[in-house]
Image (cartoon, rainbow, N blue to C red):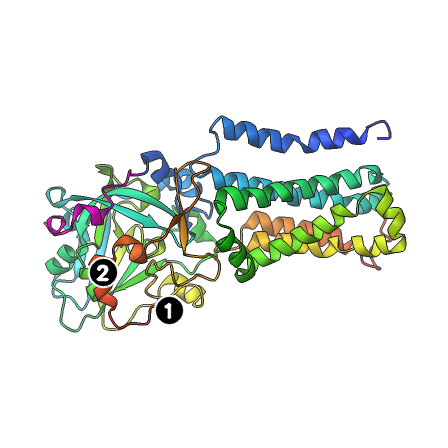
Amino acid sequence: MRRIPVAAVWLAGAVPFAVLLWDTLQGQLGVDPIRDIEHRLGRTAVYLLLATLAVTPLLRLFRVNLVRFRRALGLLSFSYAVLHLLAWAVLDMGLLWGQALRDIVKRPYLTIGMAAWLILAILAATSSNRTIRALGPRWKALHRLVYLAAPLAILHWLMAYKIWPSWALWMGLALAILLALRLPGLRKLRVR
Amino acid sequence: GAAAVLPRAAQAAAERPNSWDEITSYNNFYEFGFDKGDPAANAGALTTDPWAVEIGGLVDRPGSYAVSDLAPGDALEERIYRLRCVEAWSMVIPWLGVPLSRVLNAVGVQPGAKFVAFQTLLRPEEMPAQRTRALDWPYVEGLRIDEAMHPLTILATGLYGKPLPNQNGAPIRLVVPWKYGFKSIKSVVRITLTDRQPVSTWQAMQPREYGFYANVNPQVDHPRWSQATERRIGAGLLAGRQETLMFNGYGEQVASLYAGMDLARNY
């Protein structure tokens, strides 16, 4: 594990985007490509956020140390969130800024999604070594906001549909487990 | 027929219809799953022949009717209609069908009938999502009698001159082009004339989001989707959005049905 460079994580993280780009150019996205682009980018952002949150439990439970890759995973998640928001604003909303802004304020699922996005933006903006040193102990407190951003992202996904999509519910369950493993009673759990 | 009294423009004939592929692979038909692609994947096993539509309630000749009784081949008309989904996307679809008024006149509507209630088939063996409790099955819908008798309201049995594919509501479905798509109930097995306003499936589930009327109205927002604009399926990646028209562009024909009504309240 120690031999794998962090750049490999970035490279692997770019694969879903490359596949999406390929599918788009090949016209393989189906009847409503805009929806597919938007949704695939959003789902990938959530998967990567869950991966980021899995780093600590993996270390505690299984002694698998991926801490070195955690910042790249988090930044990748935010990158997909940026692309997801761009796809919504440019392709879906067609750059109708007035309506887009009104919708963000008026529609709870969009307000919630935007809140999650803003938190991730703050965390990404404060992820450099220099900021970590400058903020000191406050950095850790600030980055605990990810425990809020992740549930908001899942909620945004659930609420975007007429009825709750089951795959989003499973991702919500995965998140609940990852967060529960951080509770005082469970954080001492060891598998080996 | 009734088509003759409708200006062609009112039917959206000027707009390019969506392709067969688009119309038959992008569907909301929750009995077969909740993803747009699920109905095309799962509806193949549905038995649509034999099929009976039970017509009852306040009618002179109640009974069980075959699809060919209701919509005989020589009575079918093509109607090219815009379809506007409450999720803010739209299509243009060349339906084949008969005016619902023709069917209702044939069974004899009694004077006391004020509403028409519709019901979709309940057959969990062939409709996999009916084995879940996501919705309160069977799906039901309703119209006011004047909406049901309006010449734009049809029972469709075909698409592009061919029989309806199962995922589009075979063998017979309602099409009400000035209302959001969910009003146009699919695979109809029961039509009941009644003096009470029926409660539709979505209205019962989320009354704040879905009303009885569900007329396309850019001024009245759905809590989840702005209804001011829509995305035309098949328009291309950078086509953006187009303005949604009052009553989906059929205002000249249907606005008078709602004269004096507060449409923000009766949504």
Residue A168 location (% of width, % of height): 59, 49
Q: Number of numbered discs present?
A: 2
Q: Chain of mark 2?
A: B
- In the rendered image, residue B257, in percent from the top left (x then y), is placed at 22, 66
Query: In terms of secondary structure, where does tag 2 sit?
Result: helix
Label 1 crowding class (10 Å Cα cut-off): few <14, some 14-19, many 20+?
few
Q: Which residues are magenta?
A: B1-17
Q: Is residue B24 left or right of residue B98?
A: right
| Residue holding disc 2 | B254
Foreground pick, B102 / A73: A73
- Local packing at callout 2 (Cα closer than 10 Å; few below 14, some 14-19, many 20+) is some
Query: Does residue B239 belong to the magenta stretch?
Result: no
Whether residue B216 sits left or right of residue B250 in the image: it is: right
Q: Nearer the viewer, residue B46 or A166?
A: A166
Viewed as shown, does residue B100 lie left or right of A140?
Answer: left
Residue B14 included in the magenta stretch of the image:
yes
- Give residue A162's mark: none
Q: Nearer the viewer, residue A66 or B246?
A: B246
Q: State the image quarter where residue B262 is shown.
A: bottom left
Q: Are marks 2 and 1 in contact (CB under 8 Å)?
A: no
* Disc 2 with disc 1 on a shared chain: yes
Q: Quadrant of the image for the C terminus of chain B?
A: bottom left
> Could you tell me if residue A161 is visible in this image?
no
Work out whether residue B52 or residue A9 is closer to the camera in this orientation and state it: A9
Spatial CA span between label 2 and label 1: 17 Å
Of the numbered discs in the image, which one, if any, rests on residue B264?
1
Percent position (x, y) of residue B168?
Answer: 32, 44
Q: Going 34% across and 69% down the picture, which residue do you hit?
A: B266
**Amino acid type shown at disc 1:** Ala
The residue tagged with tag 1: helix, strand or loop?
Answer: loop
**Subunit bearing disc 1:** B
Residue at 34% of width from left, 61% of height from top? B214
